[in-house]
Amino acid sequence: MHDGTSTTTAPAIPGWRLIISDTGRFWAIRNRAFPRTALCVGAEPTVDADTFEEVQAAVTEQEEKARGAVAGVSS
């Protein structure tokens, strides 16, 4: 029985909602939509992976792709 006093912290990725499926697969869904320019270059607002580290790396890749697209428009 869980009494709500556990100090165990679930993994988190700022700006993304993390879901762990009942099969143990990790999914991350961006809280806010990427700008259209980021989507046009292939930035994905939803990623999945077998481990937290892999999904975290996938999130980083998508954020970098989005930053590059937005920076390219701003220049």
Image (tube, rainbow, N blue to C red):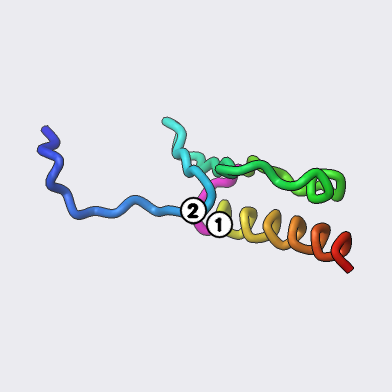
Task: Name the spot of residue 3 as percent of width and height, x first.
Answer: 10, 38
Residue stretch rendered in magenta on the structure: 48-53
User: What amino acid does circle 1 point to?
Assistant: Gln
Q: How many labels does the image show?
A: 2
CB-based contact (under 8 Å), mark 2 and mark 1: yes
Give the residue drawn at x 62%, y 54%.
Answer: 59
Residue bearing mark 2: 52
User: Which residue is nearer to you in this view: 29 or 27?
Assistant: 29
Q: Name the residue under label 1.
A: 56
Locate the N terminus by quadrant: top left
Residue at point 24% right, 53% down?
Answer: 8
The crowd level at tag 2 (other Cα within 10 Å; few <14, some 14-19, many 20+) is: many
| In magenta stretch: residue 72 | no
Snapshot quadrant of residue 39: top right
Q: Is residue 29 left or right of residue 21?
A: right
The residue at 72%/62% (across/down) is 64
Please state if 2 lies on the left or on the right of 26 as rendered: left
User: Label 2 sits on what residue type?
Assistant: Phe
Measured in 3D between alpha carbons, the distance from the residue under mark 2 to the one under mark 1, in whole angstroms, is 6 Å
Specify the farthest residue to the bottom: 75
